[in-house]
Image (cartoon, rainbow, N blue to C red):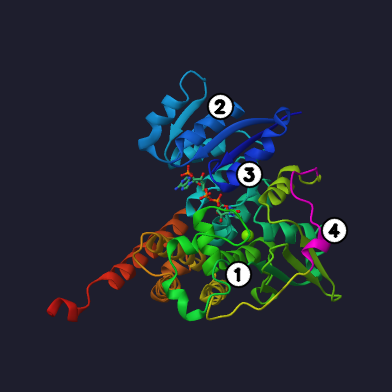
Amino acid sequence: MTRRVSILGATGSIGCSTIDLIARDPAAYDVVALTGGRNIARLAEQARALGAEIAVTSDEALLPDLRAALDGTGIACAAGPEAIVEAARRPADWVMSAIVGAAGLPPGLAALEEGATLALANKESLVTAGPLILETARSHGARILPVDSEHSAVFQALVGEEISAVERVIITASGGAFRDWPLEKLSEASLSEASSHPNWDMGQRITIDSASMFNKALELIETREFFGVEPSQIEVIVHPQSLIHALVGFNDGGLMAHVGPADMRHAIGYALNWPARKELPVERLDLARIGQLDFRAPEDARYPALRLAREVMEARGMAGAVFNAAKESALDGFIAGRIGFMDMAGVVQDVLAQLSGDTGLMSAAFSLDNVRAADHMARVRAEENMAGDNAPQRSDTWT
Ligand code: NDP
Ligand code: MG
């Protein structure tokens, strides 16, 4: 029996790895919807190769290009955020949520409302709206399977275990591009230096977030939301080899570690084949050749994002949406050369501090509208803060 699958964010790093797995067994799948952003050539090529029902770009201005690229194929085309949500609603058994950023939340919710199994790479969904997305899954009898490698690892370590026996969850971090840089050099880190990851081949945004550990900060919150453990039970450890993805510590003192190559096709394939395990085209580790695995504590001064994530976990409510949106804006600012690498954490901290007093906003009930409002306010504030940073100093104006 074939399974109906859709891939949101098909043209990205996770999307392409998902397609790599699906394309190895074409008779097993009917591809329903593929969505992308600006990479129309890739989206059209994927839709043709997989015989998708519909291809959707988030960018309405690019619809004529998509139409032209799919002319004569019979594949439907659409554009815009609403069209992506509609595509996610098409009947499917399994939907990959791999759009980057807060834009991934509405289509993921739509897929859950239709009862699809949601393979969740888009960690921002859990960070911004954890209770909403879990409740939507519950009330529609839909399942969420984690795709982030650490969360897939925890999920696998928990098979057959009681969550009440869990003492702690340890997620690993490579330490990113600047793990071994002198601290005082970090403020000068360039965009190209921040965009290269020591172990993983990923999209540019998550690669920069790995260097700053904003990615791990999002994953702390994601762990708390997905597995329902207390913030005090979650630890981050720097593990430069990126071979252990997470460990679960139980009340008898034992630790279960998940070990595998740094290849997202493992976690994607686990979610695709769950509850079965099937052969996957990932490297088999040669432990004797690897020789050793190293661990060290993350330094607070190098990775201020981790402290901010702990504050967000305490505050709850809309703090996750504010944190994520401020982080996305600060990242845009860094990519555009408007702020330095270490300024990103400062922008996020200031936005959290400024909005923390707005209890109406921060304590609002979890709904898509309230999450959007918090996201919007955080972006406005982050923008103001960055404009302030760039504004000419008074003394400059007067000289
Ligand atoms: P990429 O940047 O490689 O891809 C992002 C995808 O989203 C692309 O298809 C892109 O389209 C599309 N997209 C971008 N902006 C929008 C928008 N506003 N609306 C709709 N679609 C949009 O990201 P990754 O694949 O690296 O990451 C995807 C998600 O998975 C993120 O949430 C990330 O945190 C998470 N993740 C990624 C991992 C990895 O190894 N890459 C590991 C664990 C989690 P286009 O390229 O055509 O413009
Ligand atoms: Mg991860």
Label 2 Cα neighbours within 10 Å, binned few <14 / some 14-19 / many ≥20: some
Q: Which residues are magenta?
A: 278-291
Is 318 placed left or right of 170 in the picture? left
Is 184 placed left or right of 49 in the picture? left
Identify the residue position indicated by label 3 in the image: 17
Give the structural element (helix, strand or loop) at label 4.
Answer: loop
Ligand 1 is within 8 Å of the C-beta of the residue at disc 3: yes
Ligand 2 is within 8 Å of the C-beta of the residue at disc 1: no
Q: CA distance from mark 3 to mark 4?
A: 28 Å
- Residue 137, compared with residue 85, is above or below; it is below
Contact between marks 3 and 1 (CB within 8 A): the answer is: no
Q: CA distance from mark 3 to mark 2?
A: 17 Å
Label 3 Cα neighbours within 10 Å, binned few <14 / some 14-19 / many ≥20: some
Contact between marks 3 and 4 (CB within 8 A): the answer is: no
Q: Earlier in the sequence, mark 1 or mark 4?
A: 4
Identify which amino acid the numbered label 4 is placed on. Gly
Marker disc for residue 242: none
Secondary structure mostly taken by the magenta-highlighted segment of the chain: loop
Q: Quadrant of the C terminus?
A: bottom left
Marker disc for residue 175: 1
Identify the residue position indicated by label 2 in the image: 48
Q: Earlier in the sequence, mark 2 or mark 1?
A: 2
- Total marks in image: 4
Q: CA distance from mark 1 to mark 4?
A: 31 Å
Viewer-closest of 262 and 31: 262
Asked if the stretch drawn in magenta spans residue 282, the answer is yes
Is 317 placed left or right of 5 in the picture? left
Give the structural element (helix, strand or loop) at label 1.
Answer: loop
Identify which amino acid the numbered label 1 is placed on. Gly
Q: Residue placed at 61% from the left, 68% from the top?
A: 220
Identify the residue position indicated by label 4 in the image: 160
